[in-house]
Image (tube, rainbow, N blue to C red):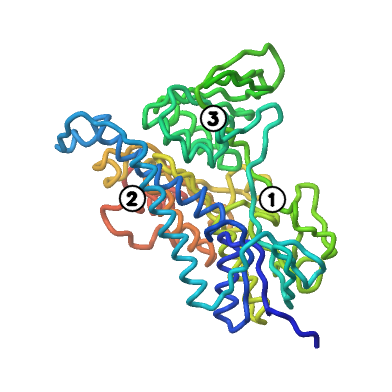
Amino acid sequence: MAEFDYDVLVIGAGPGGYVAAIRAAQLGLKTACVESRGTLGGTCLNVGCIPSKALLHGSELFEEAHDGTLAKFGVKTGKVEIDVSALQGEKAAAVKGLTGGIEFLFKKNKVEWLKGTGSFKDAHTVEVEGKSYTARNVVIATGSSVTPLPGVEVDNDKGVIVDSTGALALPAVPKKMVVIGGGVIGLELGSVWRRLGADVTVVEFLDKLLPGMDGDVRKEAAKIFKKQGMDLKLGTKVTGATVKGKKATLTLEPAAGGDSETLEADCVLVAIGRRPNTDGLNLAAAGLDTNQRGQIETDHDFRTKVDGVWAVGDVIPGPMLAHKAEDEGIAVAENIAGLVGIVNHAVIPSVVYTTPEFAGVGMTEEAAKDAGHDVKIGKFPMMANSRAKTNGEPDGFVKVIADAKDDRVLGVWIIASVAGTMIAQAAQAMEFGALSEDIAYTCHAHPTHSEALKEAAMSVRGKPIHI
């Protein structure tokens, strides 16, 4: 048998890659991880999930103090101001602590960090900064990057037209911000700067926000963000952009065709999606190619068509979510070690961390019907939930979608201040094949937001208590 430098070599140290490396090492496999960034954790920890949540939290605290929410609860403050540099400092501290934590875990588990950019020489050989390393198994976990928009050139250094990375690092609050894209990233970062004082307009090509979420959630989202002060231009496409000094001028036209218009802004955020990072890997040398969407196809166990080469995370089909990549990282390491690693892709929760939060798991009502299910729906408004009402958080609802024949839960969709936390119960219930009745007859602590999920499940059978 050929000798290899490593049992497992992972390319990429984002949520999928670093988790795969750590789990492989825990299972006794000699493991290395290739990463070109100066810190571990990939986009998520460095310029994605974590820094955005730091800014979201800080902006929420500012808004509560600034808009009178605290005063309603007897908390009196003087003049409230935002120090953006201090907020950015707190964000940086959170990122430093978490990325440093991954480096500690690499050392603890004896994962070797190969610093640099990796590319294939053949299926079992990866070149990193001019040096070749061999591995019995190679895991591709290179993540994704921002999808560009033709005619709108991003230049984060200038700070006028930016992508998500640039929007996380703005040194001051723009007066007028235009967000191109009404998905998760655009709405989260748009919310940050709106709370801090920016006039925010969201331009979305589709006629509703949050593509992929349940129809009722998408309708309610528009109402909520409009009420918060965002200007929404739905069914609108951006056809071009010019920058003059510190101003950008966008050209817009209806998605269905029609007269164009212009829109000026101090800052434009391009947030139309992400694309797999496969350029530069020299996949052909390993005998691999990509599909029409630039993704690497794998089987259920995350094997590619080439023996000994595996792939997880944003480079393979499925939602581009950090927690999906993490679960796949664990599973691929266990499969390599001869164990059984499984990810149930039908039960992957998604969350939008705005205020309120939007979360869902499983099928939308539309998808369930398209799949041939006869469905029963249970809905419960958060304004009837005692904890939400007491906290002054009336927006939103919980929606449970169940199969009318066997009562099995097909999907759960939540709009609530803590929807991202609440959705975990729904995901776990669905993982175990729960019926709506199972959730309805499970005792929930009072008073909690989660009681709304219980009541929505009771509503499936037409017997909620508090509406």
As drawn, the label of residue 276 is 1
Q: Is mark 1 on a helix, strand or loop?
A: strand
- The image shows residue 230, relative to residue 91, as above or below, that is above
- The image shows residue 242, relative to residue 466, as above or below, that is above
Residue at position x 66%, y 64% in the image: 11
For label 3, the residue is 179
Work out which residue is located at the far bottom of the displayed protein and give it: 1
Upstream in sequence: badge 1 or badge 2: 1
Q: Position of residue 376 (x, y in %)?
A: 53, 48
Mark 1 and mark 2 residues within 8 Å of each other at the beta carbon: no
Q: How far apart are marks 2 and 3 (CA)?
A: 31 Å
- In front: label 2 or label 3: 3
Upstream in sequence: badge 2 or badge 3: 3
Q: What element carries label 3?
A: strand
Q: Where is residue 17 in the image (x, y as percent from the top left)?
A: 60, 64
Residue at position x 43%, y 40% in the image: 354
Which is more toward the observer, 364 or 37? Answer: 37
